[in-house]
Structures are given as structure tokens and as C-alpha cells.
Image (cartoon, helix red, strand yellow):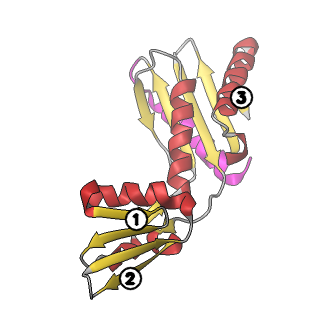
Amino acid sequence: MLVECYDERGAEVYEIIIKQIFQDLVLGASVDDLKAYVNPDDPVFVLSIKMRKTSNVVLFGDVADLTYNEANGRTMILIDNENYLPNILKQLWKQFSRDEIYQPNRYQLEIEGDYTELESVVVDDPHSNLQRRIYDAVFRILPEGFKNIKDLSTEDIVCVVATDELIKDAWIEKAHEFIDELNKGM
């Protein structure tokens, strides 16, 4: 972690703030590196965070068996991994009302009609979940009042430039430098 600031004490304070927020949100193990630039004189705050690799997306068919029963005209869903049940229900509730989903027990769901194509629906995206948690941390770290925010994030790097003034090109260049450095592992 590197916090650039002309004021050494200011850099130390921001480093403490960042570490505390990451500890509160249990993000330390999910981040490879972090670079921040703070300049109260301008005022600007640039923050770039490189995320660690996550596991692949989990599809409905990975955690449940879907079969269509022609006799009763229902799709039977047998849950293989109960940990994903809340995510499965959340996805089903986007498409069906709660009344349309019959749940005789916690491992079985039934829906009227043939919905075996649900096997390809994403029920969990660890990368997206981690990215969302990192954005939560970023908005806790940014100085209050810095409402002008430019998001320069890439696939594995969350990067924002924030200020209470107009965003200058030099700050965007600084953010791109951070992104390049994090991509190279510097």
C-alpha cells in the first residue's frame, strides 16, 4: 500500500483510515495492492485498488438439478448446495412471484411450466460481489464533500478520482499511472 501526499503526517493518517476500513469490511485478503494520492491543496483524492482473482461465476445448474416433469407440468429443482439457496430464490423472484414457487422443503422447489433453461442463470458472481464491496470501501475512504467522482476502473482494478472542484486532466493521468503500475505489479 502506498499513500502519496506532500504531508507525511496526512499520508500516515490516510493509511490508518484505509487499513481500518479494509479491516472493518474484511477486505485485506481480497486486495493485491493499493495506491492513493492525496493533495489537500488542489484538493484531489485518487484511489486505485487491485483486486485478487476470484473464483468463477456459479450457474444455477452448478448448484441445483432442474428437471421437467411432463406428468404434472412442473419444473422440479433439487438444491445440491444449500449455501446458494438465498441466491437461487433471489433469481427466481426476479422472474416469478413468490406464490408461483412452491417449496415443500429446503432442498426442493417447484415451478409450474418448463423452466429447465434456468440452468444457465448466474446465481453467484464472486468477482462482481468483491467489486461491490471494494466500491463500498472506496466511498467510505473518500473525503466527505468530494462529490465530483470519475470512475476509471478496469476489470481487476477499481480506480476513482474525486474532488470538490472540476476534475483536471493531470489527476486523470495520475490515475492511469496508478492503473499501469498496479497492472505491472509495482
Region rendered in magenta: 165-186
Q: Residue drawn 75% across and 12% down?
A: 9
Q: Which residue is tagged 1?
A: 104
Q: Report the amino acid beneath label 1.
A: Pro
The numbered dot on residue 67 is 2
- Which of these two is toward me, 21 or 150? 21
Residue 170 visible, this angle: no
How would you rate the neighbour count of disc 2 (Cα within 10 Å): few for under 14, some for 14-19, many for 20 or more? some
Distance CA(mark 1)–CA(mark 3) = 46 Å
What is the magenta segment's predominant secondary structure?
A: helix
Q: Position of residue 100 (x, y in %)?
A: 25, 62
Q: Is the residue 89 above or below the residue 22 in the image?
A: below
Distance Cα–Cα, label 3 vs label 2: 48 Å
- Name the residue rendered at 71%, 28% in the picture: 19
Question: Residue 148: horizontal and vertical position, in percent?
Answer: 40, 25
Residue 90 vs 56, above or below: the answer is above
Q: Which residue is mark 3?
A: 19
**Residue positioned 48% across, 61% down in the render:** 106
Mark 2 and mark 1: Cα distance apart in space: 16 Å
SS class of the residue under badge 3?
Answer: helix
